[in-house]
Image: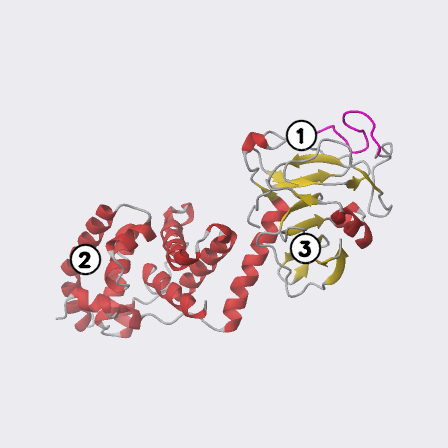
Amino acid sequence: MTARRAGLVRVAALLVSGDLARAEDIVQTALTRMYLAWSRVRPDTVDAYARRCVVNEAIDERRRPFWRRERVHAQLPDVPIASFADGPRSDEEEVLALLATLPAGMRAAVVLRYVEGLSVAETADAMRCSEGNVKSQAARGLQRLRDTFPAHAHLSMKGI
Amino acid sequence: MPDVLDVLRNLPRAVEPGRTDAEAVAADVARGHRAVADRRRRRFAVAGGAAAAIVAGAAFALPVGGAGPQSPKPPGPPVSAASRVQLVGWTGKQPVGFEVSTVPSGWEVVSSDKSAFVVAPPGQEITQKPGDPISFEGRIVVSLQGLSHFPDESPITEVDINGRKGRMGFPLADEGKLSDTRWLFFKDAKGRNVEVDVPASAGLSDDQIVSFAEGVTVTDQAQEIGG
């Protein structure tokens, strides 16, 4: 459980652009759902089931009305933009930030296929979609990252 | 300039590791226990929809199908926790999943199917549409144990149920706070784990709960409801 938990939090964090607090929330909710469904979980599919719960939770979180609503503030938040405040970022930080610009499903396909190294079938199982959809989403997501990564990396190198 | 694919493969190193300490895992398990307890307390989806037999009005105190050798006592006034209720013999049609020999006097069957046997105290609204969720709140429930487990905070009393060991304790009502509902877990003659939930408002003593549990027989049709 301990070793699996670390992997689940990592996947969740990648799906929410490295936000560890949200990743913890997602994993906690996913594990609770899994606990409630434990009698239906086969021992040989525990890992896949847990991963599916996390992916669903991460994707569903963005679908909730709370996230869809525009949030109104009386004043502009005084938050520094990372690239201005922190100077140049590493390639990994750049790509992590770019992942956030992808639609949730596309991001999940990219993370599960290219970061976690799952097969197309395993990714389709985790996302509960067809293998064709996984191939399409992953390929398009990767292309979008390739299109934007050089430009971002260039700007980041200059500290802009 | 590295390829995006290579950067993606190295991405796990850019993410802070999540908590894997024993405390975090224990908290996960405690959340699971609470969720199971909450689900049990609030409601459960009636297995089989219309198969849920609603026997509203077939009060224990009013024998179904005529008086038998175990004729229950006549109905009395509403029972409160302060005044001890009496267990009376069950003479109605036996439930599908869980047969019982006694029930608290005056209590009525809300549902009896493969998932659970649920009885409500006198005066409680028990009208129920087939397929609707059934509340466990304030009701005695007999089911298979499923995922229910005593929280660490609960004191455990060991009891004897037909010569087999039973354990009585309390679920969590909220984080760090025990419910006043009593849970009794015991194995039946076939080794299946049975659970009896009795709210404090039932006014049953521990001995009465044991006596009630001794009259429970799990049939082959009984199914777990997962929690």
**Badge 2, how many Cα within 10 Å: few under 14, some, many 20+?**
many
Q: Is residue B123 above or below residue B155?
A: above
Res. B127 mark? 1
Q: Is B84 in front, or is B18?
A: B84
- Residue B24 appears left or right of A15: right
Of all chains, the one bearing label 1 is B
Q: Is A58 in front, or is A43?
A: A43
- Boundaries of the magenta span: B56-69
> What residue would you read off at disc 3?
B185
Q: Main secondary structure of the magenta part?
A: loop
What residue type is disc 3 on? Answer: Phe
Quadrant of the image containing the N terminus of chain A = bottom left
Q: Is residue A141 above or below residue A24?
A: above
**Badge 3, how many Cα within 10 Å: few under 14, some, many 20+?**
many
Residue A77 in picture, x, y percent from top left: 38, 61
Q: Residue at 69%, 30% (x, y): give it.
A: B55
Q: Residue at 75%, 45% (x, y): give it.
A: B215
> What residue would you read off at disc 2?
A142
Q: Nearer the viewer, mark 2 or mark 3?
A: 3
- Residue B64 appears left or right of B225: right
What residue type is disc 1 on? Answer: Thr
- Residue B97: quarter of image: top right
Of all chains, the one bearing label 3 is B
- Residue A159 appears left or right of B224: left
